[in-house]
Image (spheres, helix red, strand yellow):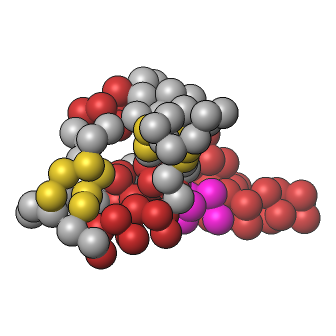
């Protein structure tokens, strides 16, 4: 990906996740004989941005690398929500709740919170840009 002079660019959460996951490669074949590309770290991207260079990549390219993640995340969210609804309804009806169910419920609440925070994160960057 060529480096561009700094312009007003949409730097969003998806771009940040892509950078953290090692999605940016830089061509270094003219500097090293044994290496052709290196992964840019978030510090490297910040360094380039500080020096008026910015790695521009379309959001569609990042989204293209995560094909079915939204469906998978929604199915997981549906499953953990079902456990939450089941446990609450058992409590309302008056059925006993085992300690295993309480422990699972704690994990369900944590999973729902994590899905909310990480929903826009692409699942895996196998083909960096």
- Going 10% across and 61% down the picture, which residue do you hit? 7
Q: Residue furthest bottom?
A: 50
Magenta span of residues: 110-116
Q: Tell me if residue 19 comes above or below residue 92 in the rendering.
A: above
Q: Residue 58 at what x, y percent from top left? A: 22, 39
Q: Is residue 53 left or right of residue 35?
A: left
* Residue 82 shows up from this direction: no
Q: Is residue 29 magenta?
A: no
- Going 9% across and 63% down the picture, which residue do you hit? 8
Please name whichever residue, 73 or 19, is drawn nearer the observer in this view of the structure. Answer: 19
- Going 30% across and 75% down the picture, which residue do you hit? 50
Please name whichever residue, 127 or 73, is drawn nearer the observer in this view of the structure. Answer: 127
For the N terminus, give its image quadrant.
top left
Please name whichever residue, 74 or 6, is drawn nearer the observer in this view of the structure. Answer: 6
Callout count: 0
Q: Residue 92 at what x, y percent from top left? A: 63, 63
Please name whichever residue, 127 or 70, is drawn nearer the observer in this view of the structure. Answer: 127
Q: Residue 88 at what x, y percent from top left? A: 63, 60
């Amino acid at each position: 990906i060529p480096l561009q002079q700094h312009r007003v660019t949409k730097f969003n959460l998806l771009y940040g996740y892509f950078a953290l996951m090692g999605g940016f490669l830089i061509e270094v074949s003219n500097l090293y004989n044994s290496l052709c590309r290196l992964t840019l770290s978030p510090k490297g991207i910040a360094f380039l941005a500080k020096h008026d260079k910015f790695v521009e990549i379309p959001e569609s390219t990042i989204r293209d690398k995560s094909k079915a993640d939204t469906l998978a995340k929604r199915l997981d969210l549906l499953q953990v929500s079902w456990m939450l609804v089941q446990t609450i309804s058992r409590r309302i009806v008056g059925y006993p709740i085992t300690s295993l169910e309480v422990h699972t419920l704690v994990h369900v609440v944590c999973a729902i919170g994590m899905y909310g925070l990480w929903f826009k994160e692409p699942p895996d960057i196998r083909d960096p840009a």
